[in-house]
Image (cartoon, helix red, strand yellow):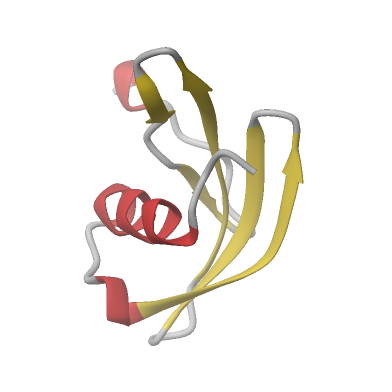
Amino acid sequence: MSVTDAQLKQNTAFALGLEQDEFVISNRVDSGIKSSYTVKTKDGRQYNCYVEGMISFFGRSVSDAVCSEKGKPVGNPFMR
């Protein structure tokens, strides 16, 4: 596994604009370089998220978290 729990939590907090203690991560599935997981916030919102990570000669690299709220279409911020 190339993505640590701490990195997952930090990148998810940044992506959702929340503090790390405002949500819980569950249902993590690691598949190759991709880690998919579910996020539930304290106010009851739920998200499907993923990050990609790898270890190279230069060290560990983890992508930004990509999240979409359950029940809503995925939005592209560049299409606004």
Pick the residue in front: 40 or 54. Answer: 54
Q: Is 1 on the left or on the right of 16, as rendered?
A: right
* Position of residue 69 measured from the top left corner of the image (x, y, whole percent): 52, 56
State the residue at coordinates (31%, 80%): 22
Pick the residue in front: 47 or 75. Answer: 47
Q: Quadrant of the C terminus?
A: top left
Q: Classify 36 as above or below 56.
A: below
Q: Quadrant of the N terminus?
A: top right
Pick the residue in front: 65 or 71. Answer: 65
Q: Is 18 on the left or on the right of 72, as rendered?
A: left
State the residue at coordinates (48%, 74%): 45
Where residue 6 sits, quadrant-wise, is bottom left
State the residue at coordinates (37%, 24%): 59
State the residue at coordinates (43%, 41%): 65
Where residue 10 sits, quadrant-wise, is bottom left
Where residue 77 sits, quadrant-wise, is top left
Q: Classify 58 as above or below 4.
A: above
Q: Classify 35 as above or below 75.
A: below
* Position of residue 73 measured from the top left corner of the image (x, y, whole percent): 58, 42
* Position of residue 51 measured from the top left corner of the image (x, y, whole percent): 52, 38
Q: Classify 65 as above or below 44.
A: above
Q: Among all residues in the image, which is located at the extreme top?
A: 57
Q: Among all residues in the image, which is located at the extreme front?
A: 57
